[in-house]
Image (cartoon, helix red, strand yellow):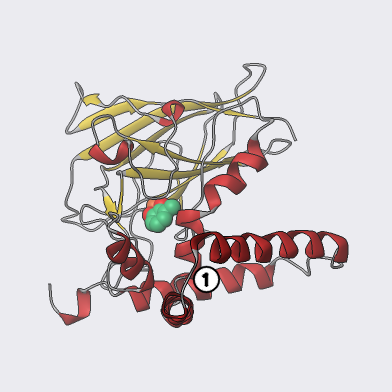
Amino acid sequence: YNEETVARAADSGANASARFRERMAAQSAGGVVDTERVNHLASRAVKALNDIVLEERVSYEEYNAFKAWLIRVGEDGEWPLFLDVWLEHSVEEVANEHREGSKGTIEGPYYLEDSPEVPWNGTIPMREDEPGTPFTFTGQVRAVDGSPLPGAKLELWHADDLGFYSQFAPGLPEWNLRATWTANEDGRFEIHTVRPAPYQIPTDGACGQLIEAAGWHAWRPAHLHFKVHAPGHHKLTAQLYFPGDPHNEDDIASAVKPELMLDPQPNPDGEGEITHYDFVLDPE
Ligand code: MBD
Ligand code: FE
């Protein structure tokens, strides 16, 4: 490590906040405010916090520590991280409860649109000496009736062997370990990448401060993030996991599901490991 390549929470947090703001601005104005709905949800949120204060007999010391911590979350740019780690899994559960296709899970704070396009069997952009086990990932994109979806798009983004995401940690090529595949005429794809490492959320920012103060841990199991989409179908946002990872059972972001487990095997035809996973998309 040197100064330039050390990932700092304030940097990756600021990047995540800026990217989120850009994306929200790009989605043209969200329509009129539903005053009734805001009143209902905001009143419930305020009441839930007041109930905790009264039931737990919260002191001024604790109240001020909370206030200082909230200020710091903003200063460190860690609202996207905090919300995606501790709240998004419930939002995802509500959003996708009626889907029949493949299970999804949370997007998290590190997705970027418009990653480089590669052929249906292409290799993800990586450094010449990219550390990690070579990893081949084959599969098919289908509709719920079993028909293949030729031309489906698969966006993949994941951390490197040290647990860092390009454009959020310093010193990595812009699109490192991020790409978009187009499925072939049979809806099939063959992705070439490296296995990601388990990921520790930044420990030097406000979220890390909370984790430390509460005696929690900061780990997510190793994971591959996907967005899979095809015309006339719901976009699927998923993450896939590796059996045996000690953090599959205690993911800090509560985003692991049994349906999202891969089954990597030694690759008989090449280096490293190979796995197979099919994505099934719901109709729109
Ligand atoms: C991640 O890589 C991630 O996927 C989530 C959900 C939260 C923090 C970091
Ligand atoms: Fe992630």
* Depicted 250 relative to depicted 54: above or below: above
Give the camera-side residue of 183 and 93.
93
Give the camera-side residue of 118 and 233.
233
**Quarter assignment of residue 136:** top left
User: Where residue 211 appears, x then y in whole percent?
Assistant: 32, 62
Q: Is residue 252 left or right of residue 273?
A: right
Give the camera-side residue of 216 and 29.
216
Residue placed furthest toward the top:
146
**Quarter assignment of residue 135:** top left
Give the camera-side residue of 77 and 62.
62
Q: Is residue 51 left or right of residue 219?
A: right
**Quarter assignment of residue 223:** top left
User: Where residue 44 appears, x then y in whole percent?
Assistant: 71, 59
Quadrant that contains the N terminus: bottom left
User: Where residue 102 appears, x then y in whole percent?
Assistant: 55, 28
Q: Is residue 233 left or right of residue 159?
A: right
Mark 1 nearby-residue class (10 Å; few <14, some 14–19, many ≥20): many
Residue located beneath label 1 in the image: 19
Quadrant that contains the C terminus: top right
Kindly state the secondary structure of the residue where label 1 is placed.
helix
User: Where residue 219 appears, x then y in whole percent?
Assistant: 29, 51
Q: Amino acid type of disc 1?
A: Arg
**Res 116 visible:** no
What's the residue at 19%, 57% (across, down)? 128
* Depicted 32 relative to depicted 267: above or below: below
